[in-house]
Image (cartoon, rainbow, N blue to C red):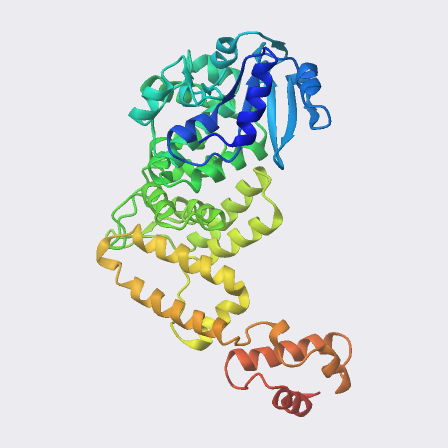
């Protein structure tokens, strides 16, 4: 249902003699029964005319592209003049923009039919390109020539694949073929934009299918994945090649971006680490470390923020390390990863197992026990970090320690607590420290 502030803006424009509609994703989501994240509006009014109709409630946020932000009902809505785009010489942005009086001209420049529909204030849908039919068919199809759409803006390739993952739609045949033929143009797109679209795609409900259908497209900006495609694993734990296992693991995980990027990267080092024993069984010793190296390079190129990069690398490098289901082992893991990182690692390991041969899924029981222990330690506020120790640096200095010796003693005390040789009680820790001062 159209929000009242949106309806009021459209009605105000229409009463002034201008054509005005909601357009794009908000219309698509409304027809799908989803709640739109935002509402974009389009009108025949020029930007200065829009501002004149909403004095004191409008901001010229993008006048060169005809966009004015209108405040209404405590929210902000972008109102953009109908336009046509000139040549896209950089495969991303139009060199020129021309304002238009035609809604049809505005809609025909858009990328996909399901996003090229408009809705008037009374709820009437304007669908010039079969968008409603494509929604019913659950397919992504370009408006007009797919090659032209992707040549204009290559990022549309990733947007289309992202929609396929998030909405669970198939990509129409001609659109899919154009995505593949135009994929090299993705090299002209800023790394940050590719990372954002890929993250949204990876966290979509249908990410596994989309990854399996288009690895050669993702390989344009993530060449690290290409050796994994079709690479056999040939051991008792696996029934899929490296890439299919990877894609299935991504889909088996919760939609946490850190977890899903970790699973995308976690086995990419396997082709480089392949060996075969006398019985013909494949082994991939050291693949976690090699995968970490490949992941680090890919994330550097895609300009990941430091926190995400570090979290993903920790998980990639630890994804196949055993966690013994005991208090000390789990406390050690909590010490390295913290509660959130521990939860993410268990999600990674669970998804990894679910994408392996069914006969080995009994290992999920062991993970459940590790989670039970971790949850209990966290709930009881057990100590697994320096910040949780019952003593601090000032206590150590009162014992006569100075400089690096303070930190060394605190780490020794934490080690005693992690190994459950000492309880996390101040008097006991101070006594042990006093006895062991050198």
> Where residue 123 appears, x then y in whole percent?
43, 23
Left or right, 238 with respect to 25, comes to left
- Which of these two is toward me, 421 or 380? 380
Q: How many marks?
A: 0
Quarter-wise, where is residue 15 in the image?
top right
User: From this viewpoint, is residue 81 visible?
Assistant: no
Q: Locate the C terminus by quadrant.
A: bottom right
- Looking at the picture, does residue 157 appear above or below residue 348? above
- Which of these two is toward me, 284 or 419? 419
> Where residue 53 appears, x then y in whole percent?
67, 19
Left or right, 395 with respect to 100, comes to right
- Looking at the picture, does residue 49 appear above or below residue 407? above
> Where residue 241 appears, x then y in whole percent?
30, 43
- Looking at the picture, does residue 315 appear above or below residue 193? below
- Which of these two is toward me, 56 or 374? 56
- Looking at the picture, does residue 207 appear above or below residue 239? above
Residue at left 31%, top 50%?
355
Q: Locate the N terminus by quadrant.
A: top left
> Where residue 152 appears, x then y in whole percent?
52, 15
């Amino acid at each position: 249902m159209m929000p009242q502030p949106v309806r009021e803006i459209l009605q105000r424009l229409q009463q002034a003699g201008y054509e005005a509609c909601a357009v794009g994703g908000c219309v698509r989501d409304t027809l799908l029964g989803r709640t739109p994240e935002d509402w974009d509006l389009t009108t025949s009014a020029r930007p200065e005319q829009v501002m004149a109709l909403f004095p004191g409630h409008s901001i010229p946020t993008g006048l060169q592209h005809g966009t004015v932000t209108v405040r209404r009902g405590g929210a902000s809505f972008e109102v953009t003049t109908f336009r046509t785009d000139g040549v896209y010489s950089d495969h991303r942005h139009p060199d020129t923009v021309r304002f238009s009086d035609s809604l049809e001209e505005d809609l025909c420049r858009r990328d996909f039919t399901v996003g090229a529909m408009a809705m008037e204030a009374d709820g009437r849908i304007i669908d010039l390109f079969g968008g409603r039919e494509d929604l019913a068919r659950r397919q992504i199809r370009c408006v007009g020539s797919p090659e032209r759409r992707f040549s204009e803006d290559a990022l549309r390739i990733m947007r289309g694949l992202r929609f396929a993952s998030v909405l669970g739609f198939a990509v129409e045949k001609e659109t899919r073929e154009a995505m593949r033929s135009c994929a090299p143009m993705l090299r002209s797109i800023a790394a940050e934009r590719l990372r954002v679209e890929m993250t949204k795609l990876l966290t979509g409900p249908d990410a596994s299918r989309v990854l399996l259908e288009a690895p050669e497209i993702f390989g344009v900006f993530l060449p690290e994945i290409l050796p994994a495609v079709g690479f056999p694993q040939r051991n008792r734990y696996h029934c899929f090649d490296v890439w299919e296992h990877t894609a299935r693991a991504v889909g088996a995980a919760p939609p946490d971006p850190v977890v899903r990027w970790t699973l995308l990267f976690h086995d990419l080092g396997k082709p480089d680490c392949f060996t075969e024993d006398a019985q013909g069984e494949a082994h991939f010793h050291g693949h976690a470390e090699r995968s970490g190296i490949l992941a680090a390079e890919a994330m550097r190129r895609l300009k990941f923020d430091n926190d995400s990069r570090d979290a993903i690398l920790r998980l990639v490098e630890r994804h196949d390390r055993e966690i013994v289901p005991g208090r000390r082992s789990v406390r050690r893991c909590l010490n390295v990863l913290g509660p959130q990182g521990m939860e993410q690692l268990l999600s990674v390991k669970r998804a990894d197992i679910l994408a392996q041969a069914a006969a080995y899924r009994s290992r999920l029981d062991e993970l459940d026990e590790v989670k039970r222990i971790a949850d209990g330690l966290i709930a009881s506020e057990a100590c697994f970090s320096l910040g949780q120790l019952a003593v601090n640096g000032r206590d150590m200095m009162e014992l006569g320690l100075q400089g690096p010796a303070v930190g060394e003693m605190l780490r020794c005390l934490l080690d005693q607590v992690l190994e459950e040789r000492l309880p996390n009680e101040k008097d006991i820790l101070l006594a042990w420290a006093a006895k062991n001062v050198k």
